[in-house]
Amino acid sequence: LAYTGIYTDWTREAILAEVEKQMKPSRFQHVLRVEACSIQLAEKYGASVEACSLAALLHDYAKEHAAESLKEIVLSKGMASEMTGYGSEIMHGPVGAYYAETVFGITDEDILDAIRQHTIGGEMMTLLGKVLFIADYIESGRAFKGVDEARKLAEDSLDEAAYFKIEKTIIHLVKKELPIYPGTIYVYNSWIQRKV
Ligand code: GDP
Ligand code: FE
Ligand code: FE
Ligand code: FE
C-alpha cells in the first residue's frame, strides 16, 4: 500500500518505523492487525483505504507514553482535564491525534477525530471513525468473550457492531469495578437513544 501523499508527506514505511519505536513489539503487531482489519472494512463499506490505514497506524501512538507525559499534553493543549483520572486509557486517543497532527502533519479532521475517538467512540462518528473503532475491537488477535459476535455484526452493519462495543465496554467496566469516564456514558446514551 503506497500512500498518495494527500494526507501526509510521510511514506507508510517511515510511519511504520516511527510507530514501532513508540511501543513494545506486541502492541506494534496489534497496530498492524488493526490496519489490516481497517483496510478490509474500508473496502467493504466504501471508506478511504489510505485514510483508514493512516488512522489505524497512528491510533495507539501515545498508548505507552508515560501518564505524566500524556497529562502534560492534555493540560497544555486545552483538552478535557477529567480524562487525566483514568491512567493512559482515555488520554491516549486525544493525545495520539495531537501527535498525528504535529509529528506527521495530518490535518484531515476525519482522521484526527477517528484517532481521538477510538477508545470511547463518539456521539457522532464518521464512516472512518466507525471503521477504526470496530477494527480496534475485532482485529484478528483479539480473543475476548463476544469478539466472534462482534465480528459477525461487523459483516452486516458497522452501526450494530459499534453499538455492541459501546454496550459491552460499559458492562465490562462495571463488572471489573473500573471507573467510567463521563464521555463513555455520554456516548452510550446517545447511541441507545438513537436505537429504536
Ligand atoms: P487499545 O488501546 O488497543 O488497548 O484499545 P482501546 O483504546 O479501545 O481501549 C483501551 C482501554 O480503555 C480498554 O481496556 C478499555 O476497556 C478501556 N476503557 C474504555 N472506556 C473506559 C472508561 O470509561 N473507563 C476506563 N477506566 N477504561 C475505559
Ligand atoms: Fe487504543
Ligand atoms: Fe488499539
Ligand atoms: Fe485493551
Image (cartoon, helix red, strand yellow):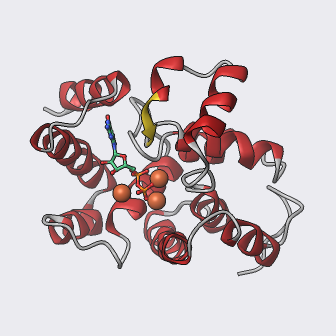
Residue most extreme to the right? 9
Q: Quadrant of the C terminus?
A: top left
Residue most extreme to the left? 175
Residue 162: x %, y % from top left: 30, 49
Residue 107 in sight: no
Query: Residue at the spot x=59%, y=46% of the render?
Result: 66
How many marks are shown on the rendered structure?
A: 0
Q: Quadrant of residue 32?
A: bottom right
Tell me if residue 187 comes above or below residue 29 in the rendering: above
Query: Residue at the spot x=32%, y=67% of the render?
Result: 138
Q: Quadrant of the N terminus?
A: bottom right
Tell me if residue 176 comes above or below residue 189 in the rendering: below
Residue 119: x %, y % from top left: 42, 45
Tell me if residue 192 comes above or below residue 46 in the rendering: above
Residue 13: x %, y % from top left: 78, 78
Residue 137: x %, y % from top left: 34, 61
Relative side of 195 to 74, left or right: left
Tell me if residue 176 comes above or below residue 76 in the rendering: below
Near-viewer residue (100 or 129): 100
Q: Quadrant of residue 182?
A: top left
Query: Residue at the spot x=17%, y=48% of the render?
Result: 168
Residue 39 in sight: yes
